[in-house]
Every structure is written in C-alpha cells, then in structure tokens.
Image (tube, rainbow, N blue to C red):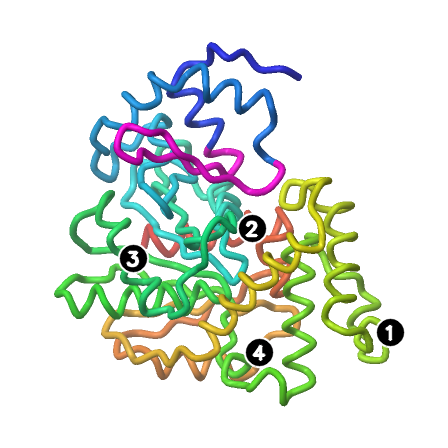
Amino acid sequence: MTTSTQTGPDELLALLSARGVELWLDGDRLRFRAPAGVMTDDLRAMLRGAGPALRDRLKQPVTAPGAVTASQAVVDDRCLMLLAKGTLPALFCMHSVSGGATYYRGLALEAGTADAVPALYGLCAEGFDLSRPPRTRIEDMAEGYIRQIRLVQPHGPYRLCGFSMGGLIAHEVATQLEAAGERIDFLGVFDTRLDELRHQRDGVDRAAQVHWLTFINICAGAVPPELHDPDHYFWQLDRSRKLELILAAAKVHNTRRFPSQADQAYIEQAYAFYDTMETAASIYRPAPVRSDLTYFQVMEAPDPRAAEDWAALTRGRFRLVRATGSHFSLFGDAANARALGRQMMELLSA
C-alpha cells in the first residue's frame, strides 16, 4: 500500500520509529539508518517530501522524562530511540549481540495502563546498519550510550536493563554512572550467561556451537531444531559455506533484515559485526555495582551458574525472577515478552 508523501512530521517520526529507523541531523543535513529492507521507495519518497518539516521538528528540544510525546520518535544523533511513550520515569534498554533494540517494544504491550508506563528507550549499537565499524569494548560502548541517555535524562536516578549481551552493557553503564555520582534506581539483567562469555570460543565445542546458533537466530528469527544435533552436517562446513546457508535462510524468514539483493559480501559484513560484538562481550570483566540488581532467569534450559555469578556483582540487594521461555524465545515469543512486561511493571511500580 502506498503512503502519502504528505504525512506530517510527527506521524512520520512515529512511523519510522515503529519500523526501527533512526533519524538525526548532521548540521542541517537529514540522515537516517534503518534495518536492511525497511526503506522502501514509498518511505524514501515520504522522507524527501517531509525533509524541511522534519529538520525543523528535530531541532526542537527533547522534553523531560514523563512528558515524552509520540513526535519524539527518535531523539538522538546515533544510538537512542524512543520505543514507547509513557508518563513514568524512563527505562533504558541496551542492545544485545545483534546490535538492535527494537524487540524491547514487547515489554510495553501489557506493562500497564496507557498512561502509567515508563517511557521506553532502546540503545542500538553504532554500526548496526553496517555503515561503519562498531566499538570493540563494552566500556567504550557504555560511555557513548551514557552521553545519549543524558540527552533524555541529564541526572539520575536511572533505570537500566539489558538482554543477553545487553545485560553486560547495562551493568557497565550502571558502573560508570555510579562512578559519576549518579544513583541507579533499577538494574535488570535478562538471561546474560557469564560462564559462556568466559570461554575461549575456538577451544570449546559447545561455545562454538552457541556462537553460530545465536547468529542464525539473529538472521533468520529462529533456529531449526535439527541444528541442535552436534552431528548435523552444518557443523562440518567451513565458515564461507555456513554463511551462504544462513543467508539463504535469512532471505526466506527475515526479509526486513536481509533484502532480496543481499549477497555473500553482505552476510560476511553482518557476521563481522556480530563477531565483533561477541568478542567485546567475551573480554569484558564486570566489577560489582552498589545498586540493587535483578536477574531474570529463563525457565527453559536455565544457566545454573548465572544467578550465583550475578549475585556476586552487586553490593546491593539481589533479586532472582523466573521468566517464561528460553534464551531465544524470551523476546522472540510475543506472549513471553508480554509476561516479562508485566513482571517488569510490578518491579518498577514497587
């Protein structure tokens, strides 16, 4: 369906945010980045037609937390996007190893009434659109994200959370904010497995398998059950052939990320981004924070050591919350995400 190029700037910003598109000003020049396959000809035409109005809209100051409107769909120059408006203090959600953060919208679906919910922000990785290399250290990522967070909320107390690798990033953001004298009101970690991150990937068969299964899940949206068999022929293939098969599956199952014209060079670049993210996670060594920490442990195939590991990384109160689903279905399944949203709302309202 063709959308009118006369769409107003507020409506267009909300539409772009819903599709995971980030928009920012570089001087007076309008720039954007988007997941592969999202920017259709119609959407590009809308951007061209609304260019002057969008530039004027983005020059307006960002309102304080609790007064966020749908028109502030994108508020930063690189990484931060508004996922859901709300009247409660903001919740900042850190990207996983995929680099994206739009899946956190699922937390808002049944988190509360239309008004009594947090303003939900997602932090995406630099280079998520493959336009430039990502940062290689979680400490550097966190430093950049804090600058973006302060655009919305200059001072604490802050509410932070992160799924998988995002749990490490949220922890480091909390560490740096505490060092700057800020208070953390909430720190939530969703199924971040510290013991796997300590492995040397090439020397541990299971860790190498998880490495590829995670990339498959990012690209195709699901992992075929047969690939959990270590004797499956996929595990005997070389790197190039693995990526070729993953690209074919991605085109079938997840065309928003991988457009039809994506080729072997594209999947190689996407894999290099992913590998950089995972390496950054593997070399990160978190230090204990002073704030309370809530660890959300999945009910399906939970990591038996994770709760103990995370409990040692807080000097405050540690809470363990059981979450429905597995690592891959915690946000991948809409029902699980809604259940997690209800759990989050109870904790944030306590």
What amino acid is found at the position of numbered circle 1 in the picture?
Tyr
Q: Mark 2 points at which residue?
A: 337
Please tell me which of labels 3 and 2 falls first in the chain: 3
Q: Name the residue under label 4.
A: 303
Which of the two labelled residues, at mark 3 and mark 1, occupies the earlier sequence position? 3
The numbered mark at residue 242 is none
Q: Is residue 55 left or right of residue 323?
A: left
x then y, percent, for residue 253? 75, 46
Q: Mark 3 points at which residue?
A: 144
Per the model, the C-alpha gap separating discs 2 and 4 is 19 Å
Cα separation, mark 2 vs mark 1, equals 33 Å
Residue at 52%, 75% in the rendered image: 193
Look at the numbered discs 2 and 1 and tell me whether their residues touch, using CB distance below 8 Å: no
Q: Is residue 313 above or below residue 338?
A: below
Give the side of residue 157 with respect to residue 226, left or right. Answer: left
Q: Nearer the viewer, mark 4 or mark 3?
A: 3
Query: Where, quadrant-wise, is the N terminus in this rendering?
Result: top right
Q: In which quarter of the image is residue 162?
A: bottom left
Q: Is mark 4 on a helix, strand or loop?
A: loop
Label 2's element?
helix
Span of residues in magenta = 17-37
Residue type marked 2: Ala
The type of residue carrying mark 3 is: Gly
Instruction: Tell me whether the residue at label 1 lies in contact with that at label 4, contact meaning CB atoms closer than 8 angstroms.
Output: no
Query: Where does label 1 land, which residue?
Result: 233
N-terminal of the pair, mark 4 or mark 3, is 3
Q: Nearer the viewer, residue 18 or 302?
A: 18
Q: Which of marks 1 and 4 is nearer the N terminus?
A: 1
The question of residue 62 being in magenta is answered with no
Disc 3 secondary structure class: helix
The CA span between labels 1 and 4 is: 27 Å
